[in-house]
Amino acid sequence: MRSSFPLFPDSASTHSGNVDALFVIWTLISIFFTILIAGLIVYFMARYRRRHPEEVGTNETVAVWLEVAWSAIPLVIALAMFVWGTRVFFDLYRPPANAVEYTAIGRQWMWKIQHPEGQREINTLHVPVGQSIKMKLASEDVIHSFYIPAFRIKQDAIPGRYTSIWFQATKPGVYHLFCAEYCGAEHSKMIGSIIVMEPRDYENWLAGGAAGKSMVASGADLFQSLACVTCHRAGDTGRLARGPALEGVYGSQVKLADGRSVTADDNYLRESILNPTAKVVAGWDPVMPTFQGQVSEEQLSQLLAYVRSLGPAASTAAPAAAGTAASASNPPASGTPQ
Ligand code: CUA
């Protein structure tokens, strides 16, 4: 799980042990030879120093076995590390046959993720524990890099072609997703969450079923899990907001980009979710992806219930939560009525 100041990332995939072992052994070998060589330099400096001004050096002869040894031993170590590192590398890039393929598309500045079942997420990826997952990566603009430290995987997402890497999560939890390639002004904000769930929980999540919850609570969950909150941030009119905040929108008059004005009722909100470019709010770019086919009728009404619960013309003056991108583990931006 996350800590506020981790010195070493969590180990949460089947790759972690292999990568860590390679890393630790390489580090120990490097430390050993650094100390050995630096120590010998200091020792020889003292041992063979010029003791008086007239002293002249003699030609030393070195035993052949010693010459061979200090060449052969490092060679063997280097080749062994090469073979070991190559095996780990191929393991990272050759998914097992039963791996399930997910797609992550990088763009400035978000990760758009699609599940094999068709679910889409932004900056959030829900996966079941114990399942081999192949990430197929692409980019819509510049080079990004899909980096999950806790899983020990990092792979560039490159415009114009697919790349891939795979993992199998070993314990449920919430883990960091980073972009590890400088990709522009908001590179440092191109972050997200990997949410590893028990298979049953994942199935429930896929089904959108939040059994035993109210419509509003289920809608609030959807607002997080569909990453609506990533763009529709309460009280945030800064650069992180990619869409209008929804507090107080329900029932109000909305000015559209084409100059018209509509009432934000159920039908308008429904259309805005399924066909977001039909009636774009003035002042915003038509960047919202369609959720047609991503949300069921039931989920739609849950979402509308949640938006409605945000109140008619309520205050939107809440200070913006600065900095970090939305995490699905965060509570909803606005209070959830019981
Ligand atoms: Cu995308 Cu850095």
Image (cartoon, rainbow, N blue to C red):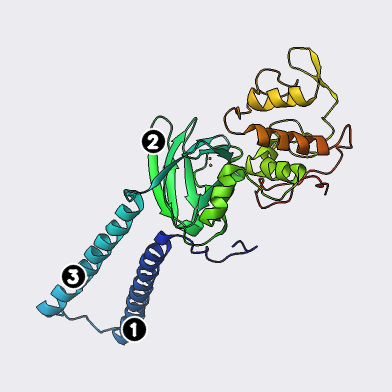
Q: Nearer the viewer, residue 306 or 212?
A: 212
Q: Quadrant of the N terminus?
A: bottom right
Q: Which numbered mark, 2 or 1, is in the foreground of this view?
A: 2
User: Which residue lies under the disc numbered 1?
Assistant: 43
Query: Residue 253: percent from the left, percent from the top?
Result: 85, 21
Is residue 24 positioned above or below 154 on the image?
A: below
**Position of residue 331 in the picture relative to residue 138 (left or right):** right
| Label 2: how many Cα within 10 Å (few below 14, some 14–19, many 20+) | some
Q: Does the image show residue 304?
A: yes
| Label 1: how many Cα within 10 Å (few below 14, some 14–19, many 20+) | few
Q: Are marks 2 and 1 in contact (CB under 8 Å)?
A: no
Query: Residue 318: percent from the left, percent from the top?
Result: 85, 43
Query: Residue 334: percent from the left, percent from the top?
Result: 80, 45
User: Which residue lies under the disc numbered 2?
Assistant: 162
- The span from disc 2 to disc 1 (Cα, nearest Å) is 54 Å
Disc 3 element: helix
- The label shown at residue 131 is none
Q: Which numbered mark, 3 or 1, is in the foreground of this view?
A: 3
Label whose residue precedes the other's in the sequence (2 or 3): 3
Q: Does the image show residue 177?
A: no
- The span from disc 2 to disc 3 (Cα, nearest Å) is 42 Å
**Position of residue 37 in the picture relative to residue 1 (left or right):** left
Q: Quadrant of residue 273?
A: top right
Three-letter code, disc 3: Ser
Q: Which numbered mark, 2 or 3, is in the foreground of this view?
A: 2
Label whose residue precedes the other's in the sequence (3 or 1): 1
User: Which residue lies under the disc numbered 3?
Assistant: 71
Three-letter code, disc 1: Tyr
Three-letter code, disc 2: Tyr
- The span from disc 3 to disc 1 (Cα, nearest Å) is 21 Å
Is residue 277 positioned above or below 66 on the image?
A: above
**Position of residue 281 in the picture relative to residue 131 (left or right):** right
